[in-house]
Structure formats: C-alpha cells, structure tokens
Amino acid sequence: MKEFSSQTRKQNISKLKDNHFDLLIIGGGITGAGVARDASMRGLKVALIEANDFAFGTSSRSSKLIHGGIRYLENYEFHLVFEALSERAKLFEIAPHLAHPLRFMIPLFKDSRVGPFKMGLGMILYDVLALFQTPEIHEKLNRVQTLNRMPIVRSSDLVGSFVYSDGYMDDDRLVHETLRSANEFGAVAVNYVKAKKSFFEDGKISSVEAEDLISKENFEISCDHVVSTVGPWTDLVGPKMVDDWKDILRPTKGIHLTLHKDRLPLTSAVVMAAQKGPRIIFAIPRHEMIIIGTTDTDFEGNPEDAKVTAEDVTYLLQITNEYFPGALLTTEDIISTYVGVRPLVKDDSNNENKTSREHTIISDARGFTFVAGGKYTTYRLMSEQIVDKVLKTWSIEDRMSVRHCQTNSPLNHYTSVESYHLAKSQAATENEKLLVERYGLEGFEILAKYGQDLNYWQLEAFQAIQTTMCLNLVDFFARRVPLVLAYRDHGLSLLEKIATVFEQELNWSSAETEKQKKLLKDYIDSELSWRKSLS
C-alpha cells in the first residue's frame, strides 16, 4: 500500500493548495474517513482535513463495540437496529482484523427493570432483525447455568440470564485503516489542518480557508462541495461555514474505565442494566483489558473540554461492584479513563437516554452537507448515503462518470477474510502472531521491512509513522496502540525505545524528543486528573 506519513502530509498540503476538489471533507473521524473512502473509490477528487489527529474525538472514545444496539428496541427504533445489525455483518467481512464477534450476557435479577419474558421477546426480535446472520443465536440460561458460565456475577436475587452475539472493534484503528484505503484511491488527507471560513462565488461555495496548525500557514482549498463530519463540533464549525447556522445537536458525555483483565475475569461481555433507570453499562473484555462504560449525560461546551469527573468514576464503580460484588473494585484498580462526546441530534426527548441515535444529513443549496448523529457501527452505510446525497447536486451528465459505491470490499487486500485467516495460520514467532492479529498478511511485511531485531512496540511505531500519518508520541500511545489504556504504567517503561524510532523517522532534535516525552506524561496526568479529587 502507499505511504501515508509525515512526508505524505507535506505533499498533500501542496496538493491542497494547487488543486481543485470535487469534495472537501472537514473532520477526520470515522464518518469523514468513510466518506473519503467511498467518494475516492467512486472516482471523485477528494480532500480531507482534520484539526487534530485522525480519530481524535468521539471515534477513539467509544465503547469500541460493533452492535445493533439491543436497548434501542425499547425505543421502537427497529429500523436503526436492523441497519446496524446488517452493517455489523459487513464489518466482520471487510475488516476481520478490526471487528471481532463477542458474546454478551444480560444477567436478570428479581428487581430487574425488564423481566425474562420481555427480554426473551427482545432476544428473538434481535436475531430476526439480524436475519439470523449472527455468529451464534441467543441462549436463555437459568440461575445455575448463569453462575456456571459467569461465576463472578452476583448470585443474590439472580434468576437467570440471556446470552447473545454482537462484536467489538478497534475504533481508532478502523479510522486509520479506512483513511489508508482512501489514500490508495487518491484522497488527499491531512491532520492538524483547521477549517477557518468559507468563500462563495455566485451563491455557491468556491473555497475554504484553512490553517496548517503545525507551520501556522493559512491557505485556501478550492472545491465544489464541502461535507462537515465533525461530530460533536458540528455546532461550532457550522457558523464558520454559513452565516445562518442553527444549532442541531444535543451532545451527551460518555466516560469509560479500563481495568486489567485479572481484576475482573469475565467469560464474555456483560450488560449491566442500571436497575432503576434506562441506562445500560457494559463490561467488555478485550485482548488487553476490561472496559467499563458508559455514562450518558447531557454536555454543553467545546468537546475538547469534556473531562472524566470523580462522580463519573464513582458511579461506574458502584454499578460494577453491584454486579460483581466479589471483585471489590476500587479506584486503585483503574488503569485509565477516557471521555467522549456523542453528537446526538436534537429531538423531543426529555431524557438523554431516549434521544435517538439516528443520523441526520442536511444539504444546503450553497454546496454544503452537514452530518450529525448516527452509530459507529453504521458508518459505512452513512458514508454511502452522504456521497449519494452529494451526487444528487451534480448534473445527470456528470453523474454518469461516477462509479457506484464499492465499500463492501475489504479495507485492503492484506485483510480480506481469506488473507486474514491465512496469515494467522502461517504466524510462528510471537511478533508474527501479534502483528498478523492486527494487520493480517501485512504483518509479515512489517517484520521484513523494519527488522526482526526490533521489539514489537518499535515495529508498531514504524508502522504508525509510515502508514497512519502519526506525528507525535501522544497520538501513538493514545490512538495507535492501547498502551495508555491497557498497561498499568501506560507504556512509559517502553518510552525510550519507542521515542528513538520517532526521533529517527521524524528527524527530531534531542530537545524535541524530550518535549514530546513530557507532553505524553502531561497527557496521561490530564486523563487521570479526577484522581486528585478522590485522594
């Protein structure tokens, strides 16, 4: 695959200045990446700018689930669940290295808000909406079977459980791999470039002024159409683009805790339905850790200012200890925390948990398309619909030259289902096994290209720098690998060896390397700042 590095970034900024684009995408999260891939695969000339790192916002701060959303059945959002389950199946096919099946258990107690009969109907409906295209259909377990399957779950007042299939994924890496695919088809994508204002000719968008936040240079990007995929920043970016913007979001804040797997030995994911309210919390086992989350509370302000609070942490720990009383979890067991803001669209709901997760695509005759809402699981379908909507503004003659959507194909040839399973069968050494799990057949190329004598994390650093436009240590530790979230020391014991790779590849001076190390440590302290109010 093509290089997608800091050198690519320099070349792409020159291209942004010198070329005219059919489509300029503002926002490098999963929706922006999906639109870039879809549009470039159809033959459009595509540019994408992101004001921070790719996947900086909600797209790296999710529950990391690929799911239909069983709780949306209570809101009668059957169409949303059907779409999500259909897209779940497609993600297992196009990105088997990033999306994996996972079983989920819903324990039921005597005081559970939803009883066994109603839950059973929901399970049947969930399988039906998935057209029975699921790794395994649901099971109903009695009390004894539940405790045999999940010994750690609370036994008092337990009446049984249901077990069903969904999936988990690497949310940030799905963004990066989608952008790599877009890059293969000619999309011109850059991070750390901010949209500032728009310019018009004859009532139509003609260009957008942007700032390179690294060089501090301002320049114009000439384009026919702008798509805003900035998620929870939509109401902040909208007024910069059009002078009659009306706010459309009802953002909500969600926080997650991460624990070492030894502290909560789960045999599957567990759905913890808060007994007296509509909120659902997940305990999700992953390769490296357990994720507990999420909260769902209204949020106002700049999403960059969202913080994990001591109250958030206490709430999640309380619910988790109610479900797993023998674990006796405390704040000392928490490795890390993270917070994201969901870009939910305003509706008439009086409760944030009832606000729909449906997405909204707003077209403006001046050449803008604004996108808000939606579920991570449906990003591919959303992207297809967005590009279709943009193309409706084209003449019939121009549309004739555009190919149909092709995003049902694997993200790259290394990780088709066949290639992925072939790679796993051929991996022999520890590094090979680790790399092919994350990169399929490309794992062998990574070893051959960067050297067998490097440790695993150095190989990951080379790969991130050369193929995901990773420019600094924070972006690597937080969004390319799970070091900050999953390791008790947040990967700091590996810092020197990893920093050496960055210093070599990005030509850092010694002073810059030390600055980058400090920025990483400051970032970790900031993410865990809630500890101060509990000490």
Image (tube, rainbow, N blue to C red):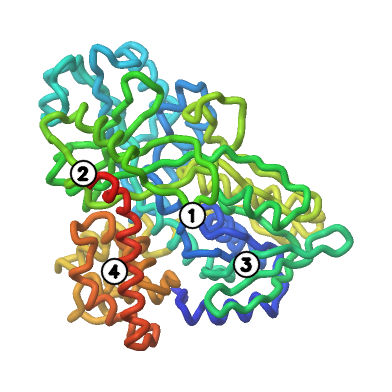
Q: Which mark is residue 304?
A: 1
Query: At which x and y percent is residue 166?
Result: 34, 37
Q: Is residue 114 left or right of residue 48?
A: left
Q: Secondary structure at mark 3?
A: strand
Q: Secondary structure at mark 2?
A: helix
Query: At which x and y percent is residue 291?
Result: 28, 44
Q: CB atoms at circles 1 and 3 under 8 Å apart? A: no
Distance from the alpha carbon under mark 4 to that under mark 1:
34 Å
Foreground pick, 290 / 349: 349
Q: Is residue 438 left or right of residue 393?
A: left
Location of residue 204 with respect to 329 vertically, above or below: below
Q: Amino acid at mark 4?
A: Gly
Q: Amino acid at mark 1?
A: Glu
- Front of the two marks 4 and 1: 1
Asked if residue 374 can be seen in this view, the reply is no
How crowded pointer 3 is (Cα within 10 Å; few <14, some 14-19, many 20+) is rated as: many
